[in-house]
Image: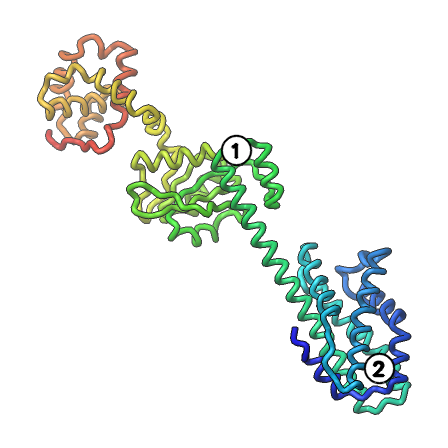
Amino acid sequence: MSERSEATRRAARLELDARVAGELHERLPLLAERTITAITAEVPSYSGTLTGQMREKIETAVQLALGTFLQLIGRSHGGDPSIPLGGALEAAYALGSGEARSGRSMDALLAAYRVGARVSWREMSTTTVQGGSSAATVAEFAELMFAYIDELSAASVAGHADELASAGRARRRNLERLTQRLLAGEPEEALLRSAERADWPAPQTLTVVLLPRANLRAALARLHPRTLESGDDLAAGGAGEDLAVLLVPDTHGDRRRQLARVLHGRRAVLGPARPWPLVASSYQRAVRALSLGLRPADDGPALDTEEHLAELVLSTDPEGLADLRARVLAPLASLPPGTADRLAETLRSWLLHQGRRDDVAADLFVHAQTVRYRMGKLRELYGERLTDPTTVLDLTLALAFPPRGETDDPAP
């Protein structure tokens, strides 16, 4: 705040009788009391709160502000209109900061300033008129009074804004720390402390969502306001872009379908809903889906990992799955590769369609007689093992999904 403020410039032009100024100083305690009484009566937010020690504290602050104002007037007679307003302005700044820390907007405080200005002006103008001041002096006195109140209001607004900005930065840092600890799978006790520091009410569940950062803002606008966002991007191998990591609260059960609808067309991957301290497992599953090459279609639905559980389970031990596949397909090893692939494909479809020949033919885009011929060859190679439950289970698991990078052979 400049030393040559609007109030000090106006004070330089004011000629107030010293006797009147003295009377105003004597009335400060009464004026402060009446100001607080009017504020508690007219500003609902302060009704019932300005009592006891709090009331005494605020009355003292009002006396300080009005005392500084009268001191400002007194200095105008000394030839130097410049007066340090630091004390009063700092008190007003602190008042605005306190309102922000209490979770209140500036509306109530500004209303209190308006009420205080009116009451103070009514009391002070009565004294100046009774003291014989001219109409011009009274008018100038009024302008100075309201300019001073404006400066106090501006200082409070600045304090309120700065406190919100500072608190907002601190809370964002705390939320970021909480997010990282959740993704790292830290113990629940540490997570509870972190959530408390971040002033983040814990939900029942959290669901991890991975999506391109370019789609982040549009998605966040439609998600739960307590959604957490990781400040670190996930480098999606092979995706050619960085992915944002979101932790969305309480989207379990029927709400999951709603979440999928909200994320339609945003190339999102959804992990499972998990109790909020265990969300690290949701993150790990979503990342694993990406590592397997699962990708949501552009302009299509979100990729829901709940719809790919079999593939995720079977890919837990890639080497073990490869060994199982090699063992159960050993009877085909002596055949030409193309023939072996076609028979393996037919066997897979036969198992999945429970031997319904027409369904297998439709699945493979071949004639039913072709299916009959191929299954005859397979029975020759496997013999009675095709009716053995253990073998059938192994074959079903091994052939459930073709190895990554393998394409279907279109030959009939």
Give the labeled residue for mark 1: 186
Q: Amino acid at mark 2?
A: Ser
What's the CA distance linking mark 1 and mark 2? 66 Å
Q: Secondary structure at mark 1?
A: loop
Residue 358: percent from left, percent from top: 19, 25
Task: Point out the image quarter for the C terminus.
Answer: top left
What sort of colour scheme is used for the picture?
Answer: rainbow
Identified at 59% across, 58% down, the residue is: 165
Say whether residue 353 is visible: no
* Tag shown at residue 304: none
Q: Nearer the viewer, residue 322 or 44?
A: 322
Instruction: Please determine whether, in this image, residue 281 is positioned above or below residue 266.
Output: above
Q: Quadrant of the N terminus?
A: bottom right
Q: Residue at x 22, y 10 (%)?
A: 385
The label shown at residue 125 is 2
- The local crowd at label 2, few if under 14, some if 14 to 19, many if 20 or more residues have their Cα within 10 Å, is some
Q: Residue at x 75, y 67 (%)?
A: 112
Quarter of the image for residue 349 reads: top left
Up the image or down, 326 lies above or below 166; here it is above
Q: Position of residue 44 (x, y in %)?
A: 77, 61
Percent x, y of residue 48 = 82, 57
Q: Secondary structure at mark 2?
A: helix
Label 1 environment density (alpha carbons within 10 Å; few <14, some 14–19, many ≥20)? some
Chain-order first, disc 1 or disc 2? 2
**Residue at image x 14%, y 29%?**
366
Residue 27 in the image: state x and y as whole percent. 90, 74
